[in-house]
Image: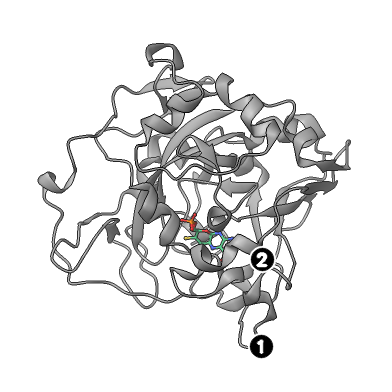
Amino acid sequence: MLFKFPKSSDCPESDVTPESLYMSRRSMLGTAVSVMAASSLPRWAGADEVARYPDVEPGKAPAWFREKLPATRWGAVNVKDESITPFKDATHYNNFYEFGTDKGDPAANAGALKTEPWSVVVDGEVGKPGRYALEDFMKPYQLEERIYRLRCVEAWSMVIPWIGFPLSALLKQVEPTSKARYIRFETLLDPQSMPGQRSGFALIDWPYIEGLRLDEAMHPLAILAVGMYGRELPNQNGAPLRLVVPWKYGFKSVKSIVRISLVSEQPKTTWQSIAADEYGFYANVNPTVDHPRWTQARERRLPSGLFKPNVRATQMFNGYADEVAGLYAGMDLRVNY
Ligand code: MTE
């Protein structure tokens, strides 16, 4: 991955803008996941959702999304004392190599991606395999807003209010067999609308593949997202369906998913296949294990600039250690990076 790091300095407290909405933390679903109770929030409904994020560009949500949105559990999981990244940055500084390698390419080129109709295949080691139209796939799930840190392996980070549902809910629905040990995700393969897949210079063997161990996938913080900032996902952010695993480097959070397979062997993932010594299968955010070419001890919180680099210390498991460290008990995280 390309890597640009501006002059570093520690992030002063004043760089954390005071508009931060973030309040109390509570545990949820019987785990230590930090949440803010939906009932303690004002009701945001209809057009008001967009008003919560004043800089949001309204999209063209499909009917199923508009119908589900009012029942969303807003602020179901939150971050404390950190500002949400402006919508403009979250949607114009992207990694989505199917649309180009520059950070602005996805916003410039992803408009051609047709996200409706969309279907998702669930197959492999499951009792209930199938191909679903996205609106049917989404039927069983209530939407939740999950405000998470996103930490890219390139050492930039954001705070994004996703809308989605727990991946564990899907897994319970499709009934993994006793042979299922991993979950594999596949992005759309469509060279016609994805110029990066047409390029003869791409290092990636398309489609983009990612994977999780089954217990990681069952963790309540792992979600499938269909929206952000109170609206449906913009194409450049992985519309219409993407993974979000907030304690792992961003490349695990695969976009525009068309196939979800339960498998018995650890899947061959895209970045691991390109450079296994640089990008591991686990890819847990870890300030004590550097990338071979740069430090992971610090990160640049966007928006950042030359005169205000907004650099801060990276947190173990991206700040979710209390919730997820147990998944890796007894493992050497230097070996399993
Ligand atoms: N998914 C696909 N299909 N293709 C990609 O290039 N990039 C990954 C991940 N998911 C990528 C992808 C990387 S490197 C990061 S950091 C995040 O998406 C970025 O998500 P964002 O652009 O919504 O911030």
328 and 164: which one is in front? 164
The image position of residue 45, as x and y in percent, is: 49, 20
Residue at mark 2: 208
Q: Amino acid at mark 1?
A: Gly
User: Where 319 sits versus 195, above or below?
Assistant: above
- Let me know if residue 25 appears in the view: yes
At x 50%, y 62%, the residue is: 107
- Secondary structure of the residue carrying tag 2 is loop
Query: What residue is shown at x 18% (from left), y 41% (from top)?
Result: 17
Where residue 301 appears, x then y in whole percent?
28, 55
Q: SS of the residue at dot 1?
A: loop
Where is residue 4? Give x, y as percent. 32, 74
Left or right position of 276 against 285: right
> Which label is found at residue 200?
1
Work out how far the residue at label 2 is from the one at label 1, CA to CA, in angstroms.
16 Å
Tell me the amino acid under the disc marked 2. Tyr
The part of the image, by quadrant, that contains residue 273 is: bottom right
Label 2: few (<14), some (14–19) or many (≥20) C-alpha neighbours in 10 Å: many
Q: Nearer the viewer, mark 2 or mark 1?
A: 1
In the displayed orientation, state which residue is furthest to the bottom: 200
Q: Nearer the viewer, residue 31 or 86?
A: 86
